[in-house]
Image (tube, grey):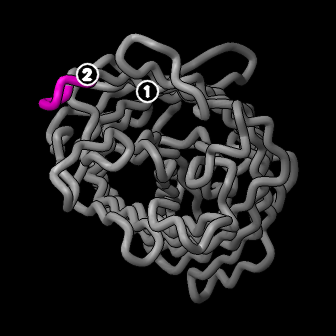
Amino acid sequence: MKTRLLAALALVITTPAVAHHGVASLGAAGLEGPGAPLETSSSATLPQGKWLAYLKLDHAKFRTYDPADATEADYAQYWMLGLGYGFTPWFSAYVFQPYNIKKDEPDGFRSRGFTDLSVIGVAGFKYDQGWMLTPANESLDDLMDWHFTAYGGLTLPTGDADHRLQDGSIDPGMSLGFGKPGFTYGLTATKQVSDDTTLVFEAGQIRFQKYAYEDGQTMRFGTETRLNAALAQRLMTLPESRFRVDGNAELNFLRIGRDVENGIKANATGGDMLYGVLGLRLYKDNLSLGLAVKRPIWTDLNEEPDQQGAEGKERYRAILTFSALF
């Protein structure tokens, strides 16, 4: 038997420009064994007693249509700091602290600051002539089995939901928190189909609560449902240098429900979209660097012409992640 060599955890948060919904995508990969995509959660847990430190940047550049309209969203940057710990071979827990920057076009509004802290627990299990919790040690043959995780977590209202813009107004889409906890849960499945190729699938959802702001308005952001599929292909391994390079290709489907403003379903919110992701993941010793470009390839948004600055209206999203296991 061989202890799984987990080189890094692939964590990412994706957040729309108008709101600030988010979910962490969890996964792990070693110099040998399954690969891990960048936006789709894989089915790996941290080794017992090990910590994972993580930094991530998601830069979203939005399509703009009217140069005279200073309220059009220009770009958003979503930074993420994360820390995970393996309590058992089959259970890991993580805490994430996001920092968001949202910028309208020149002379428009800008919002920046730390947002709601989030915590997530992940339970791992597998199927090998029967169901079992993820064991501490697995051979390379064992790693070819189907692996699964179930995860769940919530955001804590540590950010400033009543953040005011330069003119003193409150825009829920530019605020720095939800005001109340939001809840996330999901399932993953991972299958290493060859020595170099891994397939990953994920289904997850985030639900939000209604919050009353200081200026009297109320908002409940629409539920987010995600269905993801990914292929990780090992391109190169240098065992003597403990170095590995993987290529990643993903399809990320996202359905966002309509926001409810002051008790009424809001126009120009919600819809369906499909993103394509192409990227690379590099491993060196216990470090990992991920780079990817994500673009919408199909959208069916509600009142789409009025949704500038929303998810599905990006020119691109540039993603960078860095993580270390210790």
* Of 246 and 252, the residue lying toward us: 252
- Above or below residue 79? Residue 262 is above
For the residue marked with disc 2, what is the amino acid? Tyr
The extreme front residue here reads: 68
Q: What is the span of residues highlighted in magenta in the rendered image?
A: 213-217
First reached walking from the N terminus: tag 1 or tag 2: 2
- Above or below residue 144? Residue 261 is above
- Above or below residue 243? Residue 8 is above
| Residue 215 counted in the magenta span | yes
Q: Position of residue 128 (x, y in %)?
A: 72, 24
Occupied quadrant, residue 187: top right
The residue where tag 1 is placed is 221
Residue 113's disc number: none
Q: Is residue 189 visible?
A: no
- Callout 2 secondary element: strand
In the image, taking residue 236 as reference, residue 10 lies left or right, namely left
Occupied quadrant, residue 143: top right
For the residue marked with disc 1, what is the amino acid? Phe
- Above or below residue 253? Residue 72 is below
Q: Report, in whole angstroms, how far the alpha carbon at label 1 lies from the one at label 2.
A: 9 Å
Q: Position of residue 167 (x, y in %)?
A: 20, 57
Quadrant into which the C terminus falls: bottom left
The residue where tag 2 is placed is 211
In the image, taking residue 241 as reference, residue 287 lies left or right, namely left
- Callout 1 secondary element: loop
Q: Position of residue 243 (x, y in %)?
A: 60, 82
